[in-house]
Image (tube, coloured by chain):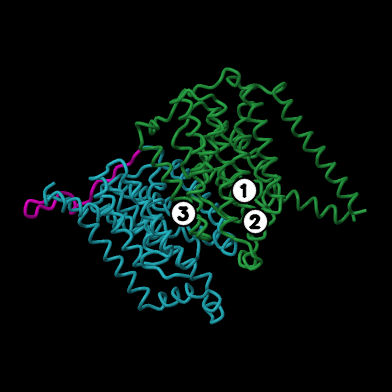
């Protein structure tokens, strides 16, 4: 294999890793703060992809319809998530893991079928938006411009989120609650409201990931399950609840996938799981997490 | 006096159990074949859920991947029947035994972790099983599954296979009943309530958890082998976490802190499935709403809520 080929493989691995990072970081954020493993996260991502198709095709006469979808689809997903948190999730925070698992699993079924009711079971293509359609040609390397855009998005979101957690009041409150819910509550923080905000924020990321992936893979049924399992792998590798862990995990996962396919095409999926098992056995808190 | 009441209670229980078994045994005389095969499916699901509940409800270990061991049982039986001349009975026994052996390997790693990490590790192992079944095309036929598995003539009719399943499920459920009521079972419940204290009184927590995991894997394997013979086809989807979640939903539906919970749950689940799918394609939507309603309004599951009512009634009577 040529050097060019390797670089292309590297870039495509990182670009898929960056999309999964957006979803995984939402999952990790919600787990870190709310201590709930949100299985419905993949379904919310799928909702984002369908909303992207819906908005961009409804406004296809207007120029830049994709960019409007990029603005509104994640917001709608976040609002939907807020509703779910307010009506359902907050009733089960004190319950056992199994109850949380089943409630969020029930949401997968409900959201999946609602999407089927609204948009049917067909694939829905979303054209790659201007000005990102077409390739970038650099020293004999040909690479899609849109994937380069995704590689750019990942670190921007990561740094933005890191700064938010580090330097804003909201970030401080979230870190305080993650550290000790009772103490934050006793000091006068409105914990339930912060929970709703964090959950909506996590859902916004899922919606954003869905919107960004729609031009690449189109919106289709079943995409929620695939991404969910991949997110599990990533957050476990990086450490449940750790933002930098989600980033590192996504890059590792993207690369393992991209190069695994070259070496053992049939077993590429298994590599992620094997990595996850190894991490869980030797370092269950993940590469960037802290032991409990 | 108390002893006499206790004896009378056990006697009453025995009569109830006998009545239910007789009822199930008599059903082929009145039910049409389609319902009978549905009932066979329910029995197998009930056994899988009871096996899962051994760790879920009794030992408090939430597994996200029981379907992995279920599929190991099903595929072992299927592969022996297709590739070797082994008699059906031996292939049938090989399924659970192999599932138990795999459970030792998986469990050995899993019991080192707790809570969400334990759950995720079981999920990862189940996904590995799924990947192997899906990708090892030369051996497992991948996505096409293994179809047309040869079954002895004797079991090749719906009523006969129903009776075979009823027998196997009754024996296994009785075994599980003996396990959970043995000192071993009581210890499991103790470590569900408080692992630290259980360790303090000299119990090797991990060893007990591993034993429970292996036993649970064995019974999941029995259910898988039974289903392999029932369906005569096996597919990688048996190991998928959708199947795992189906088992978890069944346990929850009936109630995980009640021995009969998984059995009641599987009956309700299969009936709901049958009734709802005859009205609408959107069965997952209805199932999702039912699960949400159950979680919010009926915490102990159907059997749990029923048992609670019974207890309050008795207290009032006293």
Rendered view: B219 above or below A158? above
The residue depicted at 66 percent of the width and 21 percent of the height is B32
Residue A287's disc number: none
Real-space Cα distance between discs 1 and 3? 18 Å
Q: Can residue A74 be seen from the camera position used here?
A: no
The residue depicted at 62 percent of the width and 49 percent of the height is B54
Magenta span: A123-141
Left or right, residue A38 beside residue A162: right
Do the CB atoms of the residues marked 2 and 1 lie less than 8 Å apart?
no
Q: Are marks 2 and 1 on the same chain?
A: yes
Report helix, strand or loop for mark 1: helix
Q: Residues within 10 Å of mark 1 (few under 14, many from 20)?
A: many
For the residue pair A163 and B245, the one nearer the viewer reads as: B245
The residue indicated by pointer 2 is: B188
Seen as rendered, the residue at the extreme top is: B153
Q: What main secondary structure does the magenta stretch of the protein show?
A: loop
Give the mark nearer the N terminus: 2 vs 1. Answer: 1
Image colour assigned to chain A: cyan
Q: Residues within 10 Å of mark 2 (few under 14, many from 20)?
A: many
Tell me where residue A117 appears, x and y as whole percent: 46, 41
Magenta span has A132?
Answer: yes
Rendered view: B113 above or below B147? below
Magenta span has B87?
Answer: no
The residue indicated by pointer 3 is: B121
For the residue pair A290 and B280, the one nearer the viewer reads as: A290
Tell me where residue A291 appears, x and y as whole percent: 44, 70
Chain painted in green in the figure: B
């Amino acid at each position: 294999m040529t050097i060019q080929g390797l670089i292309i493989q590297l870039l495509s691995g990182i670009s898929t890793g960056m999309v999964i990072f957006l979803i995984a970081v939402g999952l990790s954020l919600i787990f870190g703060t709310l201590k709930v493993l949100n299985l419905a996260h993949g379904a919310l991502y799928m909702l984002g992809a369908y909303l992207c198709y819906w908005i961009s095709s409804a406004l296809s006469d207007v120029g830049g319809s994709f960019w409007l979808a990029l603005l509104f689809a994640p917001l709608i997903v976040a609002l939907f998530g807020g509703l779910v948190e307010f009506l359902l999730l907050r009733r089960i925070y004190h319950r056992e893991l199994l109850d949380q698992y089943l409630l969020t699993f029930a949401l997968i079924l409900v959201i999946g079928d609602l999407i089927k009711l609204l948009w049917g079971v067909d694939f829905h293509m979303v054209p790659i938006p201007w000005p990102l359609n077409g390739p970038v040609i650099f020293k004999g390397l040909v690479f899609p411009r849109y994937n380069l855009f995704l590689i750019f998005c990942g670190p921007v979101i990561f740094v933005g989120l890191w700064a938010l957690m580090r330097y804003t009041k909201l970030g401080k409150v979230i870190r305080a609650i993650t550290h000790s819910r009772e103490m934050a509550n006793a000091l006068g923080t409105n914990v339930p409201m912060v929970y709703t905000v964090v959950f909506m924020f996590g859902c916004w990321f899922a919606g954003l990931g869905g919107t960004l992936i729609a031009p690449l893979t189109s919106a289709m049924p079943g995409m929620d399950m695939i991404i969910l399992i991949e997110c599990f792998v990533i957050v476990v590798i990086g450490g449940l609840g750790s933002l930098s862990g989600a980033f590192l995990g996504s890059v590792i996962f993207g690369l393992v996938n991209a190069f695994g396919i070259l070496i053992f095409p049939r077993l590429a999926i298994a590599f992620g799981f094997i990595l996850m098992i190894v991490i869980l056995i030797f370092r269950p808190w993940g590469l960037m997490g802290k032991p409990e | 006096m108390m002893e006499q009441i206790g004896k009378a209670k056990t006697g009453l229980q025995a009569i109830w159990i006998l009545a239910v078994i007789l009822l199930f045994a008599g059903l082929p005389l009145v039910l049409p074949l389609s319902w009978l095969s549905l009932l066979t499916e329910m029995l197998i699901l009930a056994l899988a859920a009871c096996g899962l509940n051994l760790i879920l409800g009794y030992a408090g270990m939430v597994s996200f991947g029981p379907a992995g061991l279920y599929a190991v049982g099903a595929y072992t039986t299927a592969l022996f029947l297709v590739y070797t001349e082994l008699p059906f009975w031996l292939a049938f026994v090989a399924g659970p035994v192999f599932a138990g052996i795999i459970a030792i390997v998986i469990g050995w790693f899993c019991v080192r972790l707790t809570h969400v990490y334990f759950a995720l590790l079981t999920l990862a192992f189940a996904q590995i099983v799924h990947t192997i079944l899906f990708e090892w095309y030369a051996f497992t036929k991948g996505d096409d599954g293994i179809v047309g598995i040869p079954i002895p003539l004797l079991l090749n009719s719906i009523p006969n296979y129903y009776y075979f399943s009823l027998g196997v499920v009754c024996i296994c459920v009785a075994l599980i009943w003996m396990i959970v009521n043995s000192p071993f079972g009581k210890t499991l419940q103790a470590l569900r309530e408080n692992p630290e204290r259980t360790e303090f009184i000299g119990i090797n927590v991990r060893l007990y958890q591993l034993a429970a995991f292996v036993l649970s894997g064995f019974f999941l394997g029995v259910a898988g082998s039974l289903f392999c013979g029932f369906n005569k086809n096996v597919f990688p989807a048996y190991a998928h976490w959708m199947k795992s979640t189906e088992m978890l939903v069944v346990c929850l539906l009936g109630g995980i802190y009640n021995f009969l919970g998984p059995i009641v749950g599987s009956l309700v689940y299969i009936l709901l499935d049958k009734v709802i799918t005859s009205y609408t394609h959107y069965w997952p939507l209805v199932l999702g709403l039912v699960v949400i309603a159950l979680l919010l309004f009926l915490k102990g599951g159907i059997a749990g809520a029923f048992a609670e009512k019974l207890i309050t009634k008795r207290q009032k009577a006293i």
